Image (cartoon, rainbow, N blue to C red):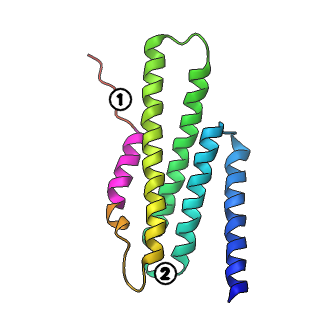
Amino acid sequence: MASLALLELMLLLLVVGLLVWALGAGRSLPQAQSEQAHRLELALAEIHRQGQRLPQLSKALKQVRQYGRDLRQLLLQMAELERYLAKPGLEAPTRDRLQQRLHQLEQGFLRGVAYLERLGAELMLVSGAQEPPALIEFPQFLIELREVLHPAAPHQG
C-alpha cells in the first residue's frame, strides 16, 4: 500500500515537473508568473489526483482542467503586457491602459487559482456520490474567466 502511494506521489511530481518545464520551454515567464504557474500546476495536479478516485466527477473535472489550461493563457498575456510596460517611451494613456489590463488579468488569474486550490481541497473530503460545494460555483468562474480573456471593446465616445 505504501509503495503504491509512493509511486503515485512520484508520478504526480513527474507530471508537475513536466508541465512546469513545458510551460517554461516555450516562453520564459518573469519570476512572479513562474511562481504563479507553479501554484496553478500544483492545484491542477491535486485535482487530477483526487479525480482519479472519483470517476463519477470525471466529466466535471475534465471541464475544470480545461479551465486551468485557460488560466495559463492569462499568465502568457500577463508576461506579454509586462514586456510592453518595460519598454521605454510609452505615452501615459497607453501605459495606464496596459497597467489596468494587467491588473484585470492578475486578479482573474489569482481568483481562478484560489478556486482550483479550494476545489482540490474539497475533493479530498468527498466520498461516494457527493459533489464538492466548489463545483456549484464553477459556471460563474468560467464566465468570469471568459470575460477576462475576451474583454468587451472599449466604447468610443
Residue on which disc 2 sits = 55
In the rendered image, the quadrant that contains the N terminus is bottom right
Residue 10 relative to residue 134: left or right: right
Q: Position of residue 141 (x, y in %)?
A: 37, 53
Three-letter code for the amino acid on which mark 2 is drawn: Pro
Considering only order in the chain, which callout, 1 or 2, is on the residue closer to the N terminus?
2
Q: Residue at x 42, y 79 (%)?
A: 126
Asked if the magenta segment contains residue 65, the reply would be no
Between 86 and 117, the one lying in front of the other is 117
Quarter of the rendering containing residue 13: bottom right
Q: Residue at x 59, y 65 (%)?
A: 45
Report helix, strand or loop for mark 2: helix
Q: Is residue 33 above or below residue 56?
A: above
**Label 2 to label 1, Cα distance in Å?**
41 Å
In the rendered image, the quadrant that contains the C terminus is top left
Q: Is residue 148 above or below residue 113?
A: above
- The part of the chain drawn in magenta is 138-150
Q: Position of residue 36 (x, y in %)?
A: 58, 47
